[in-house]
Amino acid sequence: MKPACRLFLTIIFILHGGYSVAAEEQKTDIELLYTKHCSECHGADRLGAMGPALLPQNLKRLKKRAAVSVIEHGSPATQMPAFHDKLGRVEIQSLVEYIYTPLERIPQWGMEQMHASHVVYHQPSDLPDKPLFSADLQNLFIVVELADHHATLLDGDTFIPIHRFPTRFALHGGPKYSNNGRYVFFASRDGWISKFDIYNLKYVAEIRAGINTRNIAVSSDGRYVMVANYLPHTLTVLDGRDLAPLRVIPVTDSSGRSSRVSAVYAAEPRNSFIVALKDIAEVWEIGYSKLVPASSTPFAIRRIKAESYLDDFFLNQDYNLIIGTSRNGNSQVVNLDSGRVIRKLELPGMPHLGSGITWQYQGRSVLATPNMKEGVVSIIDMTTWKIIKRIDTLGPGFFMRSHENSPYAWVDVFFGPDSDAMHVIDKSTLKIVKTLRPAPGKVSAHVEFTRDGSRALLSIWDKEGALIVYDSRTLKELKRIPMRKPSGKYNVHNKLTRSSGTSH
Ligand code: DHE
């Protein structure tokens, strides 16, 4: 640069006030800090990726002081690590200020953007109705492998992989099957929804239905896919046949305040979707057929007042009760028929009700839930809503599973020094009868049973991981199949029949 130019720029700098330029440099430093430590999980633009979007409108429930603590110490039950040994107090404070600063522009994600992202690879009617392989179609598993973003279709009798295929980046939540199990629907954290034809081993269609997405639900008749989003604050309805976008439902209360969606589930017996909200104390029931009580218009919203937000919830086997909990420890039972909260529950720590399961114990239905903050499984009587047993475990757990034909319930110890352990609980005595450590030093998690309940499949959550098949009665290992961080596995029959031992 010529000296005259430099002098000219210096004068401009002084005229505009050196301070604002310094502030600009400061902002750049913060951006660099964010890029270095946060962007890989939360997105370069703060719109979310593996981790949630970091924008003031999505952080409404988190006070700045609490945000400092999350960055310092990590967040329980998430992949958020602690940064106290990498970042100083001032750096953490400035990151907090940064993430609470509104973006100049949040991208729109409505019908136009969805249409632009929509791809139909095959018209469903163009593909043959006969599977390309031979296997018991109700005893197939889809295994999601997070390490390299793939999924494996597994034969549930031979335990031989039938097909391995790439998925979108960072799938989250259970894939959902169409009513006969031919199709499976996936959702990624960055909003991509994919429909895969299991018979023909091909993707049928894909669409980006949100910027930062939670999960999906598929109506029992397969006509609709409902997508729950963190960003924007919407639910989107897709056509179950080819994923064409049908409707965007803004998620707001009567005063116009908007909310992230915690999760959506299909309540088959009610012909409706049940929706939990993160920033509004309401549960929504959205009917998709004229049979829905209190609504004759498809997608009309029935608002049920809740005691507090619902971050996580469980639906009972009859689909008339929700047992929900918020991260601040408020648990409640909501009756969907009367539209009322019928009970407040005193549950310790942070129960993971989404992973709750039920069984018959001494003539009554009990709900068992792992806990993401404390090493405990709570057993709750579903008539009196009292905790009848507290089963102490080696540490907080994530997933719990059983099967109608199995005497045992399996619960992992996902967090802490014993994360390689898996407890097996006798459902008739409510006692831990065995603790397995199938791969010492590696996380063992997420069990799912075969269709008949005779085998239990466990994940070794590691890049060089495995799926381990156990005899579910003798608890003997039968087979080990190498897999790349198999996060979850989903049996067609158990999902479609809504087994009481698995998530729905
Ligand atoms: Fe999940 C399911 C929410 C963190 C792996 N998780 C779900 C569902 C919800 C949920 C609402 C049910 C969706 C469905 O199946 O339709 N998960 C949350 C959180 O709020 C939380 C605590 C924080 C977050 O980051 O979103 C969280 N979840 C994680 C993880 O860190 C896990 C372990 C790794 C990952 O993939 O990000 C994880 N979640 C899973 C899995 C399921 C799941 C494997 C499906 C379980 C099943 O068997 O159905």
Image (spheres, rainbow, N blue to C red):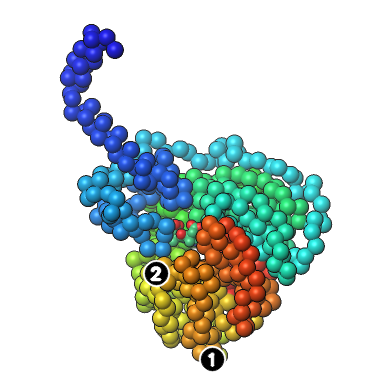
The image quadrant where one finds the C terminus is bottom right
Question: What amino acid is found at the position of numbered circle 1 in the picture?
Answer: Gln
Image x and y of residue 449, in percent: 63, 73
Specify the quadrant of the image occupied by residue 278.
bottom left
Image x and y of residue 408, in percent: 57, 82
Residue assigned mark 2: 417
Q: Residue furthest front?
A: 440
Nearer the observer, 299 or 477: 477
Looking at the image, residue 203 sits to the left or right of residue 227; the answer is right
Image x and y of residue 213, in percent: 50, 51
Q: Secondary structure under badge 1?
A: loop
Image x and y of residue 498, in percent: 63, 71
* Residue at 48%, 38% in the rendered image: 108
Q: Which mark is residue 362?
A: 1
Distance of label 1 from label 2 (alpha carbons): 35 Å
Nearer the observer, 193 or 365: 193
Mark 1 or mark 2: whose residue is earlier in sequence? 1
Looking at the image, residue 199 sits to the left or right of residue 87; the answer is right
Q: Is residue 448 above or below residue 8?
A: below
Question: What amino acid is found at the position of numbered circle 2 in the picture?
Answer: Pro
